[in-house]
Image: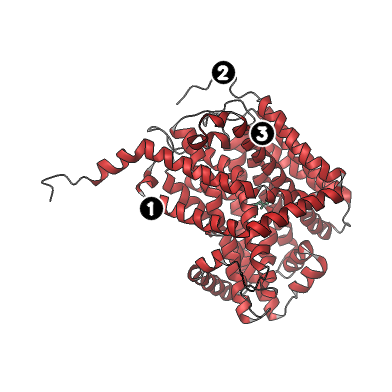
Amino acid sequence: MNAPESHSDRLDLRVFVPAVLVIAGLILPIIVFPESGAALVNAAFAFATGRFGWLYLLAGIAVVVFLVGLAISRYGNVRLGGPDDKPEFSYFSWVAMIFAGGIGIAIVNWAWVEPIYYFTGPPFGVEPSSQEAAEWALTYGQFHWGFTPWAFYCLPAIPIAYSMFVHNRPGVRLSVAARGVLGRHADGWWGALLDAVVVFGIVGGVGTSLGLAVPLVSQLLSGLLGVSPSFMLDIAVLLIWTAIFSASVWFGLAKGIKILSDINVLLAGVLLVFTLVVGDTLFMVEGWVNSLGKMVSNFVPMSMWTDPVGDSSFWRDWTVFYWAWWIAYAPMMGLFVARISRGRTIRELIIAEMVFGSLGCWVFFAVWGGYALDLQISGTLDVAAILSAEGIPAAVEAILGTLPMSGVITTLFVLLCFIFLATTLDSSAYVLASVTSRKLSGYQEPQRKIRLIWAFLIAGVGVALIQLGGLKPVQTSTIVVALPMIPVLAILAWSLVRWLRQDFAKKVLEPHLVIEDGKH
Ligand code: NM2
């Protein structure tokens, strides 16, 4: 283990100040000039997804092919760490942290309602609300939360972990992982720009997640407590959230983030099993099996469907939007997952993300999505009508209301919402603190003080966005940031391949393939 340099964990003002300025510089105008700010951001978004929608799709399938190839190749055996490095966490906690870090409040909103949107507005020119539409509805949920997005999450983690634990380079930053290609520019302006964009992406992303989460939880709480929704309730919800995730980030990886992630996964498991048992179990299970088959056999067409002749908007509105959203979170996830993956092999990392990450999301969509679709098709509850009239929080509340013991279940669900978002926020604050520390090694934790500063900054951005209504433009601009991230992903992959070739080509090829004489 490398002895950390003294003061290496101090706040690095050279990164912290520009990062805060970038956040303020991008968020303040949106809040101060809401109309022109929103118009500008929307134009940038329309440009990115309108002109470059195809690029997001190509990037998606390319990343899947690259990672599957890497996992199968002999480089998959390369251990992210020195010969004495043992994994820091148990397999369950490691996978739980990966899952809970990258999946937040979005899944508890969308798993219930996303299939309903697909059912009423299906792809491939299918008749809305038809049997075919129902099958695609379940399939697309699995696709948009499956291999491709998890591959986006996984890619940056590998070169970052490689730089941290194989090369033992200090600095938990994306620029460090791009060094294989950027060379010494990684320490100069290019590197600084890259890290500033990453910080903005993370703060914008978590700010938006908070903004999505507070209305949902406020709606559910106001129903449960019999109080009417108000600004004070929103702020109370936000304060509880801040207390939970600040505590978790204060206690650090092993005592805070890990424990909260374990609870997160277990509580989600309880609610999923409950829904599976009390709902039409067979419909959900059959729906899942069917949709996995449909996804596998249509994986390439779904991945590359740009509808050039029909020019429908499904692929842009959903696939491109989702790919961009996941890419926006990918640097945060890369930094976080790299930090917790010391001692794992490249193959293990790819399997944990692409297989177990996807599996986790699939279960949510199969069970909650299947349950909601069953309500819709059987006529028990017109979820689609509630969605279009009152929005997602009201639809989720109505769906929860159809479950037996709905009061208890809704209470547990609210608890799950709190924990699910908190586990994304604590990883984000942890990563931001690492990025803005001087030269942290992969063996150190960022200072508590810096972790808390970021926790409060995130909460502050959340309050400002809720209060001043800048949520949508900030979400949109976070997604716009995903476009320049596509070449960055390519640079990271290239860096990794270069390093692997330099460091391991001979080792990987020689010893394993020799058949010793006389042994046959
Ligand atoms: N993703 C998974 O709030 C959240 O759930 C953050 C969103 C990228 C769609 C992650």
N-terminal of the two: label 3 or label 2? 2
Vertical arrangement, residue 38 with respect to residue 271, above or below = above
Q: Secondary structure at mark 3?
A: helix
Which numbered tag is attached to residue 250? Answer: 3
* Amino acid bearing label 3: Trp
Residues at marks 3 and 2, CA–CA distance in whole angstroms: 22 Å
Residue type, label 1: Ile
| Left or right of residue 265, residue 384 in this image | right
**Nearer the observer, disc 3 or disc 2?**
2
Q: Position of residue 364 (x, y in %)?
A: 61, 62
Which disc, if any, is residue 317?
A: none
Badge 2: residue crowd in 10 Å (few <14, some 14–19, many ≥20) = few
In this rendering, would 316 be left or right of 282?
A: right
Residue, x 56% and y 49% (percent of image)?
153
- Mark 3 crowd level (few <14, some 14–19, many ≥20, 10 Å Cα): many
Residue at the disc numbered 1: 72
Mark 1 → mark 3, Cα distance in angstroms? 39 Å
Question: Earlier along the polypeptide chain: callout 2 or callout 1?
Answer: 2
In the image, what residue type sits under mark 2? Ser
Query: Residue 159 location, x and y as percent?
Result: 49, 40
